[in-house]
């Protein structure tokens, strides 16, 4: 006889007994739950099983570019499973904690990140396309079309008079030529003022610059892995070093595998567990920790990171005391050398990871 989730009755009974134990999950999205926009086989079943047993989980991704609610809405529909916006940490979600620190920011990424930054609460948001609208000769090799300028750019009144406070790279930009030039202009400017160039050469940029992840590669629907934000960061850093007498750029990195993001995600996971226990899963209020601080106390005996990228998912889990499940549906392929990490388990897919964990813990 099969249970409602399609598992043998004895196995399902073992899984139910697990629900009282203090374990939790964090799932990468690209290459684990989805490949591009298409669901990976039985990914929805894996999450429905956890929902059924009220086992806490979050989605922890180096992707981004849209609001958390928008991303979760798409994933929920694609996988036919109910997921709360409070159950996702995107690469730039920790930027929410910087709203009271910086007022005028250069928000780098796809055009949608301008709206994301504003919804987070940043008061003065400038996107590179706004700077291109101001003066196209700033980026002579930009691929931005006139139609894109008309649709996505805005005139910024204090663009050249009010200094930038920070550069925040939200997700992988689409116009690398323009964004490399504009970022370089801002971080080498005189105190953050556009159209200026400082005279001193330093490892410290004129304004702080943050990258939301450092993934060199990621998996989409193409059969070979593609360059990610880590490659873009490498170019920004290389150009900065060339312009500053060989001095390295002091920048800030969040996203997997950094402890900043894993600690942030751990706090979000603890908060979600409390909401599950208190029947508050419809809440829209989320506890946000300060960046760089570990959770004071965790109720979990084990947290399992299910991911496809050894360099971010698995190494990050190991460095931060989590267990790790490496799946073969994304970046990692059979035969790849794992010389810097040792996953807790290597499995075919996310469903196998979840059922194996629940049966063994």
Image (cartoon, rainbow, N blue to C red):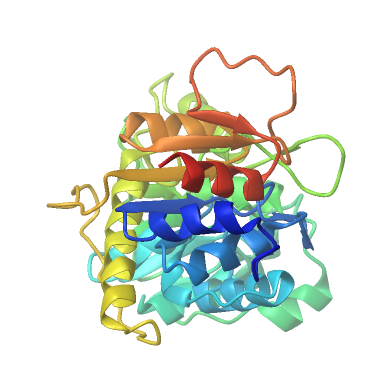
Q: Is residue 206 visible?
A: no
Residue 253 shown left or right of residue 132 in the figure: left
Q: Residue furthest left?
A: 296
**Residue 67 percent coordinates (x, y):** 53, 74
The answer to which image quadrant residue 278 occupies is: bottom left
The C terminus appears in which quarter of the rendering? top left
**Residue located at (23% from left, 71% from top):** 100
Residue 102 horizontal side relative to residue 84, left or right: left
Asked if residue 323 shows in the view, the reply is yes
Please name whichever residue, 278 or 193, is drawn nearer the observer in this view of the structure.
278
Q: In this image, 313 relative to 192: left or right? A: right
Give percent across and percent down for residue 119. 44, 81
The structure residue drawn at horizontal position 32% and vertical position 60%, both measured from the top left corner, is 20
Q: Camera-side residue: 313 or 55?
A: 55
Give the camera-side residue of 126 and 300. Answer: 300
What residue is rendered at 70% in x and 77% in y? Answer: 77
Q: Is residue 199 above or below residue 292?
A: above
């Amino acid at each position: 006889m099969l249970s409602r989730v399609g598992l043998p009755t004895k196995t399902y009974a073992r899984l139910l007994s697990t629900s009282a134990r203090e374990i939790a999950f964090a799932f990468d999205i690209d290459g684990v739950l989805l490949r591009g926009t298409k669901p990976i086989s039985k990914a929805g079943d894996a999450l429905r099983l956890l929902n059924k047993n009220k086992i806490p989980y979050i989605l922890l991704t180096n992707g981004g570019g849209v609001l958390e609610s928008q991303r979760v809405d798409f994933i929920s529909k694609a996988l036919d499973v109910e997921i709360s916006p409070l159950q996702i940490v995107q690469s730039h979600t920790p930027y929410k904690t910087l709203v009271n620190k910086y007022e005028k920011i250069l928000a780098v990424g796809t055009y949608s990140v301008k709206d994301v930054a504003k919804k987070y609460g940043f008061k003065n948001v400038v996107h590179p396309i706004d700077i291109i609208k101001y003066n196209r000769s700033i980026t002579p090799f930009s691929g931005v079309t006139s139609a894109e300028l008309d649709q996505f750019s805005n005139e910024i009144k204090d663009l050249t008079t009010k200094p930038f406070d920070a550069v925040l790279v939200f997700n992988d930009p689409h116009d690398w030529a323009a964004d490399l030039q504009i970022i370089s202009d801002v971080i080498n400017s005189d105190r953050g003022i556009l159209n200026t160039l400082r005279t001193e050469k330093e490892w410290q940029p004129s304004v702080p610059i943050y990258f939301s992840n450092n993934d060199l590669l990621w998996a989409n629907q193409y059969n070979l892995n593609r360059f990610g934000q880590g490659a873009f960061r490498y170019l920004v850093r290389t150009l900065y070093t060339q312009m500053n007498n060989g001095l390295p750029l002091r920048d800030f990195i969040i996203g997997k595998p950094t402890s900043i993001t894993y600690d942030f995600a751990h706090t979000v996971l603890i908060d979600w567990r409390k909401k599950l226990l208190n029947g508050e899963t419809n809440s829209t209020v989320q506890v946000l920790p300060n960046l760089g601080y570990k959770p004071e106390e965790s109720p979990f005996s084990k947290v399992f990171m299910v991911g496809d990228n050894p360099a971010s998912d698995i190494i990050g889990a190991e460095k931060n005391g989590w267990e790790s499940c490496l799946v073969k549906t994304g970046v990692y392929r059979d035969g790849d050398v794992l010389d810097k990490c040792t996953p807790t388990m290597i499995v075919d897919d996310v469903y196998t990871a979840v059922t194996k964990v629940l049966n063994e813990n």
